[in-house]
Amino acid sequence: MFNSHLKNKISELDSQLEAFKKSIHILENENNRVHAILNSMVEGVVAVDKDTRVLWLNPTAEKIFNISESSTQGRIFLEVFPNNDIAEIIALVLKNGEVISQELSLIWPVQKIFQVNASAIFESKVTNGCLLVIHDITEMRRLETMRRDFVANVSHELKTPLTSIKGFVETLLEGALEDKENSVNFLKIINDHADRLNTLIDDLLDLSHIESKEVVLRKDKFSLAGLVDEVILGFKSQAKKKQIEVSSALPQGLEIIADKSKIEQVLVNLINNAIKYNKDKGFVRIYSGELTDKIKIIVEDSGSGISARDIPRIFERFYRVDKARSRELGGTGLGLSIVKHIIELHGGNVGVESTEGLGSKFWFILPG
Ligand code: ADP
C-alpha cells in the first residue's frame, strides 16, 4: 500500500520533472531566439537597470560605443559611456516610465548622428530598467544634406545664365533694339548664355544617367591609342589658340575592353580641362603607366595646378577652385565627377597629383 503510494508519487514527480525540462527547453529556445535577433540587429540595443547599471548590450552597441559587453556589465551607464544626453534620456524614462525618441549628435568617440528610442522595462507594473535602441542615421543625414546642396547648386547654376538672358532681353525690349550694333552684341551674349544652359543640362543629364542603376555599359575591344588620337584631333583648334602642344605617347597596340563612348567622354573631359586650365605655349601629354593586370592612363599638363587643400574635393559635383574662371571658360563643375563615375562604373579608380603653379597629372586606372 505504502509502496504503491510511493510509486505514484515518484511517477507524479517524474512527469513534473519532464514538464519542467520541457519548459526549460522552451525557455532556452526562446532565449536563444531573442539573443539571435538582438545580436543580428543593425540598431544598437542597451538594457540598464533602475540604478542605470548596464545589464546587457548587443554587438552593434559595442561597436557604436567602442566598448565590450564584458567590461560594462554591472557598471553605471554614464561611467561606461560619458554622454550626458543619453544619461538624461535614461533618467527621464526611469522617472516617468514613458517612451522617448530623440535625435542626438555625438562627437565622441566619432562624429555621428543617432536616433535614440528609449522605453521603460516594467516588472510587475513598476519601472525596473530602461531599454535603449540606437539607430545610426549619420549616412542618411549626409545623403539628405548632399541632395539639398545638389538642388541648391543646380538652381543657382541655372539661375545665373537665365538672369543674364532676361536682363539683356528686357534691355532690348526697352529700346536697345534700335541700336543695331549693340543689339547684335546683346544677342551674342544671350546666345552664349543659352549655350551655357545647354551644356549644363547636357552634363546634368549625363551625370544622372551614369548615376542611375539602369546604366548599361556597351563594352567592346578597341585601341585606346587610336581613340586618344581622335580626341586630340577634336581639340586641335582650341589648343592652337593657346599654342599648346598636345601629344600622346600611348603604345599603338594598347587595346582595352570598355564602353568606348564613355571612355571617350572621360578623355574629352580630362584633355579639355588640361587645355582650359593651361598657360599659353604649355603642353598636354597623355601616356600610360606601368601596372600589372591594370591599365593606368595619365593626362599631364603644364597648367595652373591645384592646391593640396582643393585636391580632396576636386572630383565632387560642382566643386571648382575658381568659380568665375571656370564659368568664363565654359565649365559647369561637373566634368570631373562624370569622369569619376564612368571610371568607377568600369571597376577602376581616378586620382590626381598636382603642384600649384606647375601643373597636374590626372590619372585613371582600368582593370586589364
Ligand atoms: P569645370 O567645368 O569647372 O572645368 P570640372 O569638374 O571638370 O569642372 O573641374 C572642376 C575644377 O577642377 C575646375 O573648376 C578647376 O578648378 C579644377 N581643374 C580641373 N582640371 C584641372 C586642371 N587640369 N588643372 C587645374 N585645375 C583643374
Image: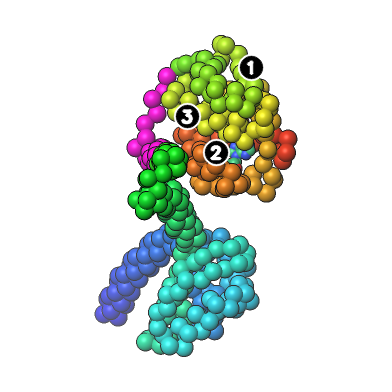
Q: Position of residue 46 (x, y in %)?
A: 50, 70
Q: Across the whole image, how many numbered discs are drawn on residues? A: 3
Q: Does label 2 or label 1 sit earlier along the sequence? A: 1
Q: Amino acid at mark 3?
A: Gln
Quarter of image, res 14: bottom left
Label 3 element class: helix
Name the colouring of the figure.
rainbow
Q: Amino acid at mark 2?
A: Leu
Tell me: residue 231, above or below residue 81.
above
Label 1 element class: loop
For the point 37% across and 35% down, the residue is 215
Q: Is residue 319 left or right of residue 308?
A: left
Q: Is residue 39 visible?
A: no
Q: Which mark is residue 329?
A: 2
| 10 Å crowding of disc 3: few (<14), some (14-19), many (20+) | some
Q: Amino acid at mark 1?
A: Ala
Tell me: residue 292, above or below residue 358.
above
User: Main SS type for the magenta part?
Assistant: helix
Q: Which span is picked out in magenta?
A: 197-220
Task: Read off the residue under disc 3.
Answer: 265
Tell me the quadrant of ligand 1: top right
Q: Does label 3 or label 1 sit earlier along the sequence? A: 1
Q: Which mark is residue 263?
A: none
